[in-house]
Amino acid sequence: MTKYIVISGIDGSGKTSVIESLQKHLERDGLQVSYIWMRYNHYLLKGMNAFARLMGLSVKVHNEMGEVWEHRLYKNKLFCKVYVWCSYIDNLIAKRKVLRQTADIVICDRWVNDILIDLGAECRFDDILDGKWYMRFQQLLPANTQQFVVQRNLEDLLGCRVENNTNPDFKYRLSLYKRLAEKNEVIAIDNTGTIANSVNQILSHIE
């Protein structure tokens, strides 16, 4: 039976390095491993993002990263409600990509929890990890899924990613990731040490 591993983490947490090392370790053990990045599966949201720009809810800004778009969806609560519904439908559709994987272990990068946190930060939905939407998105996860969130200290997060110093949503996102780590169904991984140590923490739960 395929095992699904969903790994979340704020930008700069070291999640990508942890995933790459974890995949290599599992493959050395003779397991077939598939990796799939799931953060942006936009079908309906493509149109919603276009509307957001027209409505001034998404604006182009200049910072150390260059020219980037920033969502300010929270300015229109009705738009946010529709946006969350569209995101849910998009991820319901995208779930098929996960279920098509036939490996022993499927590593899903930034699915469900990261998407919820994106929605919470952009719409300022304080209860995004506690209310009905959390339950609906959790139900998207296949059977035999384990969820992990990679954590790192604030100094490292700010030092390794320029955008964490300029993104107005960073502190809000970070607070949501901290709340995510407190969930019983989510296993927190301390990535303040070596990547090998973080991988061993995950392995201790899946082997």
Image: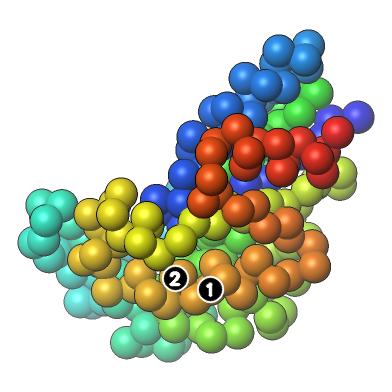
Quadrant in the picture for the C terminus: top right
Identity of the residue drawn at 60% across and 84% down: 127
Name the residue at 61% across, 74% down.
179
Residue 20 in the image: x percent, y percent? Answer: 54, 28
Residue with the mark numbered 1: 176
Q: What element carries label 1?
A: helix
The residue positioned 79% from the left and 62% from the top of the image is: 185
Tag 2 secondary structure: helix
Q: Looking at the picture, how far across and down is residue 172, in whole percent? A: 42, 77
**Pointer 1 local density, CA inside 10 Å: few below 14, some 14–19, many at least 20:** many
Q: How is the image coloured?
A: rainbow
Residue 142 at x, y percent in the picture = 80, 46
Is 119 in front, or is 175? 175
User: In this orientation, which residue lies closer to the viewer: 25 or 36?
Assistant: 25
Residue extending furthest toward the right? 1
Q: Nearer the viewer, residue 60 or 78?
A: 60
The three-letter amino acid code for the residue at tag 2 is: Arg
* Residue 10 placement (x, y as % from top left): 46, 57
The residue identified by callout 2 is 173
- The answer to whether the residues at label 2 and label 1 have Cβ atoms under 8 Å apart is yes
Q: Give the vertical position of 34 relative to 178 (above or below).
A: above
| Camera-nearest residue between 73 and 20 | 20
Q: Which disc is residue 167 wearing?
A: none
User: Relative to residue 202, is residue 159 depicted above or below?
Assistant: below
- The amino acid marked with disc number 1 is Leu
Q: Distance between the residues labelled 2 and 1?
A: 5 Å
Q: Can residue 89 be seen in this view?
A: no
Among the 4 quarters of the image, the one containing residue 79: bottom left
